[in-house]
Image (cartoon, rainbow, N blue to C red):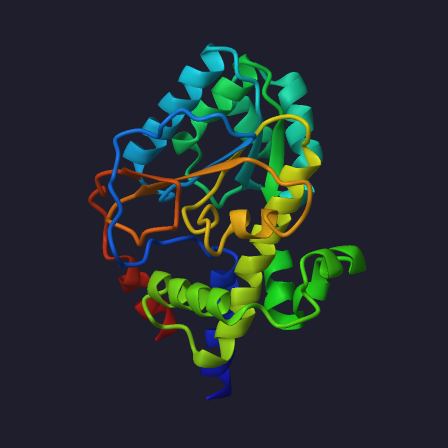
Amino acid sequence: MISLFGRRVGLILLMAAFLAGCSTAGSPVVNKTAPDVVAAQVWLLGEVHDNPAGQRQRHALLRQRVEAGWRPVLVLEQFDRENQDLLDKAQKSCLDAQCLIRVAGGGRWDWQQYYPLLQLALDYHLPLVAGNLSRADASRVVRDGMRAVFDAQSMGDYQLEQALPARLRAAQAAEIASSHCNMVPEMMVDGMVNAQVARDIWMARLIREQRPRDVVLIAGNGHVRKDIGVPYWLALLQPPLSLHSVGYAEAPVAAGQYDTVVQVAAPVRPDPCASLKQRAN
């Protein structure tokens, strides 16, 4: 029994590092084929990580705007924060995205999905910011709470000394349950919620640090949700930033989660729950 419990805890700590947004059901919003081009300081562009159609549509949007003269900073979930030095080095020395991936990428992502985006950044000299907390960071948050990764100033700024708002915690818990095939033990939910929230807050901090430059966040749909993700935490601090959040969703989502929802076709993929069930057993 102890051995089984240990394996279960290890699995959950690993899953905490991969918390990603999956759209929940609700009153559908009107889906669009592309976002409206609006003036905003911060564009938060979501994704279903393994959806090639969404990746292509998002890249086309960015390319169109960059070719027209826009020069934002790109904050990317795909790079862990401790790899910023490697990312800076790669941007200075690499001529193509394959080189950048080799120097600064890790083993957690299907990098060919991001090759066009990274090549666009190199071609137009768009600064790249490593936007994610690492597996080790996420595990520490699951185990020890927010103080594991945030200093006293941030704890105060983002009101982390008090309990998370009940609505936000419940919505995050629902996202975690659905994206992990309803296999998360109840005792682990609070820690995993904290890990997801910690990532959102970290991305919000990085976005604010780029001012006065415009910023594009590249992250999973859950991170760019207006009601519980990065936009929620950006709104807590001054000065206010103008935001536009885009969800690239495979199914209708609840009203109020994004400024724009772009409908993308789901690729053929194996049952995502099969491997989790096998590993848990």
Q: Nearer the viewer, residue 100 or 140?
A: 140
Q: Residue at x 44, y 34 (%)?
A: 111
Please say whether residue 231 is visible from this viewpoint. yes
Q: Is residue 236 left or right of residue 231?
A: right
Is 234 above or below relative to 181? above
Q: Residue at x 24, y 41 (%)?
A: 30
Residue 218: x percent and y percent? 49, 37
Q: Residue at x 47, y 62 (%)?
A: 15
Quarter of the image that includes the C terminus: bottom left
Q: Residue at x 64, y 25 (%)?
A: 213
Q: Quadrant of residue 246?
A: top left
Residue 104: x percent and y percent? 60, 33
Please, which residue is most extreme toward the right here? Answer: 152
Residue 275: x percent and y percent? 32, 62
Q: Quadrant of residue 86?
A: top right
Is 189 above or below relative to 255? below
